[in-house]
Amino acid sequence: MSKESLNLTLKVWRQKGSKDKGKFETYKLKEVSTHASFLEMMDVLNEQLITDNKEPVAFDHDCREGICGMCSMYINGRAHGPQRGTTTCQLHMRHFEDGETITIEPWRAKPFPVLKDLVVDRSAFDEIQRAGGYVSINTGNAPDGNAVPIAKKDADEAFNAAACIGCGACVAACKNASAMLFVSAKVSQFALLPQGQPERKERVGKMVAKMDELGFGNCTNTGACEAECPKGISISNIARMNREYLGAMLGPGN
């Protein structure tokens, strides 16, 4: 075997449905290219399973460019794997060792029930955004980019918050399955900009209430969410959301 390839043992979580009991199954892969992405390695595994007349492993994927946030896998005890600031689809096999055993699981959180194998239902995030994560004012035609003055610091922070792809790694990494980093990023991207001001207080109240209703846990300030976020969303957004929420609860003028 050349240095360009790896022999691997994969321990993959298999589960037929949300009401079924799952278990790990072990597979062997030989001569996996170190240039392959993690999802390409999973494709090779599925081709092998199909050849052996076995059911392939179900996993989420779409863009495979680190944009859509669908490639939610828990790899060797870390959301998206060992490479910081990297989605599963952008993780490459050169970051693993020949002969290594790789354990692959779905996100583990009550609000993210397993649908099949490594696929989880993350529609809870959609419900939170629908609860208030939008701007409903009629803006008419698109205004000129320089028509609304915005401080560079605010624009940069709003842009950084908007980089959240909603993958759910923050929830998977948190011991309480908290969605605070995700919700705070969505609150921040609107609260920092003039367009988001009219519904600022109403928005944060509705989104936090929906997050609690869906069963996400509380934040314990361990910072695991920020450490595992593939887009590096800062926990400073959580502090901002807490201020926004307190102001909303205290009423007008706060």
Image (cartoon, rainbow, N blue to C red):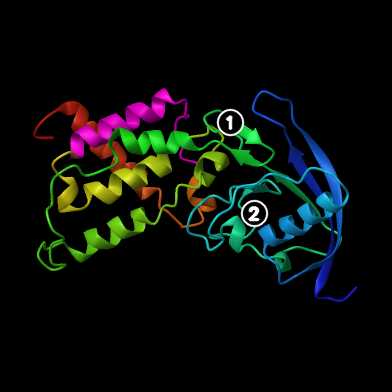
181 relative position to 142: left or right: right
In the rendered image, residue 207, in percent from the top left (x then y), is placed at: 32, 33
In the rendered image, residue 15, in percent from the top left (x then y), is placed at: 72, 33
Along the line of sight, the residue nearer the viewer: 111 or 249: 111
Quarter of the image that includes the N terminus: bottom right
Cα distance in 3D space between marks 1 and 2: 20 Å
Along the line of sight, the residue nearer the viewer: 192 or 196: 196
Give the image quarter of residue 133. top left
Q: Residue at x 52, y 30 (%)?
A: 111
Residue 65 is inside the magenta segment: no
Quarter of the image that includes the C terminus: top left
Amino acid type for the residue under numbered disc 2 = Gly
Of callouts 1 and 2, which one flags the residue occurring earlier in the amino acid sequence? 2
Amino acid type for the residue under numbered disc 1 = Pro
Up the image or down, 30 lies above or below 52; here it is: below
Magenta residues, start to end: 200-222
Mark 2 lies on residue: 81
Mark 1 lies on residue: 113
Q: Secondary structure at mark 1?
A: loop
Q: Is residue 136 visible?
A: yes
Residue 178: assigned label: none
In the rendered image, residue 27, in percent from the top left (x then y), is placed at: 85, 49
